[in-house]
Each structure stands twice: as structure tokens, then as C-alpha cells.
Image (tube, grey):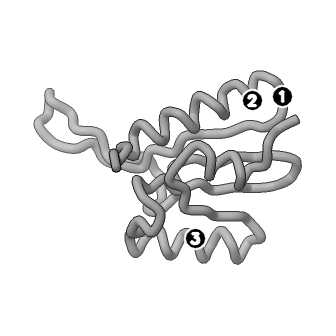
Amino acid sequence: MRVISEINIQSSIIDYLTVEEKLGHLTFQRINNIPVYDDKIKKYRSMPKGTKKGYPDIIVLKKGRFIGLEIKKSSGGKQSIHQKEMEKLIKSQSGEYYLVSSLEEAMAVIGYCK
């Protein structure tokens, strides 16, 4: 069985969400909370003020729902401690948080947009 990389899974989900956003069904944001390496200064840039570790890869807002999608290359993928803490925090605020490993899983979580 061929394992699809997280970046390819994420890309397919973003492509789908982009179409749904253009149709007015939802809005989303890809979250990048990994510091960027700056070749000029030969070190990682510091993260912007207010950036928190553990946020899900993609945030979706749809009809009053806050949906966090954490992409893993296989179901049962391991979350970091920060991701587990963020999952608890999001759920404690009535948000939704899901581990997904395919476009089909993401679509099932979000609900087909019509």
C-alpha cells in the first residue's frame, strides 16, 4: 500500500476548501506555526507575537462551526503534546478538532457543502 505524504493530503484538502470557499460555503485558513529559516542571518526567525504551538493545520469556519483539521499521513498518527493540549482547549470552547488522513475524511468531517 502506497503511503501519501501529509503535504499531499493537505494540498488536496486545501484545493477542495478553496473551491468551497469561492462558492461561499465556508472560509478556511492554513495555519503555519513552524519558524522559517532565514538564510541571510543563518537562523530561524522568531514566530510572530501571539503565535501558539499546536494549532491544527487547517481551520475551517462553516455555518457557526469552528473546525480544526490536523493532518496525519495515516489514521492513528501521533500528535505532539502541544497538539493534544490545543485539541483539549478547542473542544473546551465548543470547537471541533479532528485528525484526518485523507481528503475523503476531511469532507466527511466538514460535511459535503451544498
Q: Earlier in the sequence, mark 2 or mark 3?
A: 2
Q: Earlier in the sequence, mark 3 or mark 1?
A: 1
Q: Nearer the viewer, residue 26 or 108?
A: 108
Secondary element under disc 3, as helix, strand or loop, is helix
Q: Could you say where residue 33 lies in the image, as x and y percent from the top left?
A: 42, 49
Residue 99 placement, left or right of 25: left
Q: In the rendered image of this protein, does residue 75 appear above or below residue 73?
A: below
Q: In the rendered image of this protein, does residue 5 appear above or below residue 79?
A: above
Residue 20 placement, left or right of 88: right
Q: Which residue is mark 3?
A: 87
Q: Amino acid at mark 1?
A: Gly
Q: Quadrant of the C terminus?
A: top right
Q: Which residue is mark 2?
A: 21
Residue at x 64% of width, y 31% of height: 16
Question: Separation of disc 3 and disc 1 at Cα?
Answer: 27 Å
Q: Which residue is mark 1?
A: 24
Q: Could you say where residue 22 lies in the image, as x and y percent from the top left?
A: 76, 22
Number of marks: 3
The 10 Å Cα crowd at callout 1, few under 14, some 14 to 19, many 20 or more, is few
Question: Can you tell which quarter of the image residue 2 is in?
Answer: top left
Dot label at residue 11: none
Marks 2,1: beta carbons within 8 A: yes
Residue at x 67% of width, y 39% of height: 28
Question: Can you tell which quarter of the image residue 32 is in?
Answer: top left
Q: Nearer the viewer, residue 33 or 12?
A: 12
Residue at x 81% of width, y 24% of height: 23
